[in-house]
């Protein structure tokens, strides 16, 4: 059974999606402008489980520009739409504020909730530090498949859990970025610029401090060694501070993203760490730059399932089989 959802919009600030049965605010989508040094851009924080535990972090002391779940571009034709210092090969990270751009909110085309699904569709402008318009983005965020532990089907081994005692829900993030320059946009990462195992760019999740040292699971392996590998999904599990229990987040590429690279234009690779902090990004420019020609559009879809409990590979694959794209 899908749980009912409600949307609240505080204009100029944020959109909040609340699970109505227990009054849990599953996400806040914040679009107000923030500090220029942090590459202002909309973000999702907090993300919460159905047991009301937060599974994202905001402005941690090691990287103030890490904000929950957000679309980023760490290296974009010489600009930094990631935030903070910019990686320069041979000089490490440098404070170069003249390179820090932004993703500005332009307006919403849809903000609605109905029949167990909430939708936020937004138009954004990707901008150079000097304000020059470089790209348009059409972004769609959907919340769906809110399922309570005690009401799941046979395949979920619900046990004796009471209805509403935890469960899972899913967020689908779609972005279509169109190059409005007269020359190509080049998407890169610190790895494409010379730093090993730092291919972060694109959609990026920063986990809470308690999730440091968490469990990383892929279809064929486990652990931080999955950094830079390809797979249709990757999961991260951690244990909460301040509350008993665990949570598991499952990150997925849509089939059209072509995670394998077979027949596609640019294969994606996972950026993942559990030390010194929890982070996951399905990077579209890990090892090689991605070039977007003038007028062309880069379209990507991802899903993040937020589940209560420490799910193992069997339970994850079972869930994914029951919830296909």
Image (cartoon, rainbow, N blue to C red):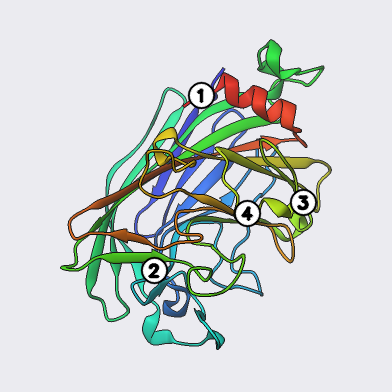
- Counting residues from the start of the chain, the first of labels 1 and 3 encountered is 3
Q: Nearer the viewer, residue 147 or 75?
A: 75
User: Does residue 260 appear left or right of residue 291 in this picture?
Assistant: right
Q: Position of residue 95 (x, y in %)?
A: 50, 87
- Counting residues from the start of the chain, the first of labels 3 and 4 encountered is 4
Q: Position of residue 121 (x, y in %)?
A: 32, 44
Query: Is 112 rendered above or below residue 222?
Result: above
Query: Is 123 rendered above or below residue 34?
Result: above
Give me the C-alpha separation between circle 2 and circle 1.
Answer: 36 Å
Find residue 137 and name its label. none
Q: Nearer the viewer, residue 94 or 10?
A: 94
Residue named by callout 4: 56
Residue lying at 78% horizontally and 21% vertically, measured from the top left: 161
Residue lying at 24% horizontally and 65% vertically, measured from the top left: 184
Other-residue count near label 4 (Cα within 10 Å), few / some / many at <14 / 14–19 / ≥20: many
- Counting residues from the start of the chain, the first of labels 2 and 1 encountered is 2
Q: Nearer the viewer, mark 3 or mark 2?
A: 3
Contact? badges 1 and 3 (CB < 8 Å): no
Give me the C-alpha separation between circle 3 and circle 2.
Answer: 32 Å
Query: Is 14 rendered above or below residue 34?
Result: above
Contact? badges 4 and 2 (CB < 8 Å): no
Give me the C-alpha separation between circle 3 and circle 4.
Answer: 13 Å
Q: Nearer the viewer, mark 3 or mark 4?
A: 3
Q: Quadrant of residue 60?
A: bottom right
Residue named by callout 2: 33
Residue lying at 50% horizontally and 59% vertically, measured from the top left: 286
Q: Secondary structure at mark 2?
A: loop
Give me the C-alpha separation between circle 4 and circle 1.
Answer: 25 Å
User: Does residue 295 appear left or right of residue 217 in this picture?
Assistant: left
């Amino acid at each position: 059974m899908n749980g009912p959802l409600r949307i609240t919009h505080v204009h100029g600030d944020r959109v909040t999606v609340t699970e109505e049965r227990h009054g849990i605010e599953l996400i806040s989508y914040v679009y107000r402008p923030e500090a220029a040094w942090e590459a202002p851009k909309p973000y999702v924080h907090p993300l919460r489980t159905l047991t009301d535990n937060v599974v994202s972090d905001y402005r941690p002391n090691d990287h103030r520009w890490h904000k929950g779940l957000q679309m980023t571009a760490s290296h974009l034709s010489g600009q930094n739409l990631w935030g903070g210092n910019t990686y320069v090969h041979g000089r490490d990270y440098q404070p170069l504020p003249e390179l820090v751009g932004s993703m500005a909110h332009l307006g919403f085309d849809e903000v609605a909730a109905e029949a167990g699904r909430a939708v936020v569709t937004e138009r954004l402008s990707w901008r150079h530090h000097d304000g020059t318009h470089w790209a348009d983005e059409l972004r769609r965020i959907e919340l769906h498949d809110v399922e309570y532990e005690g009401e799941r089907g046979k395949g979920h081994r619900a046990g004796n859990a009471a209805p509403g005692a935890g469960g899972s829900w899913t967020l689908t993030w779609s972005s279509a970025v169109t190059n409005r320059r007269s020359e190509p946009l080049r998407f890169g990462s610190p790895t494409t610029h010379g730093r090993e195992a730092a291919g972060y760019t694109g959609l990026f999740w920063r986990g809470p401090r308690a999730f440091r040292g968490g469990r990383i699971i892929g279809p064929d392996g486990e652990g931080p060694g999955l950094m830079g590998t390809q797979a249709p999904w990757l999961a991260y599990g951690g244990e909460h501070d301040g509350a008993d229990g665990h949570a598991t987040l499952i990150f997925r590429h849509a089939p059209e993203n072509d995670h394998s690279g077979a027949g596609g234009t640019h294969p994606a690779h996972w950026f993942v760490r559990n030390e010194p902090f929890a982070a996951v990004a399905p990077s579209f420019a890990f090892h090689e730059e991605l070039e977007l020609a003038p007028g062309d559009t880069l379209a990507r879809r991802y899903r993040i399932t937020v589940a209560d409990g420490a799910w193992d590979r069997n339970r994850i694959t079972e869930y994914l089989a029951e919830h296909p794209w």
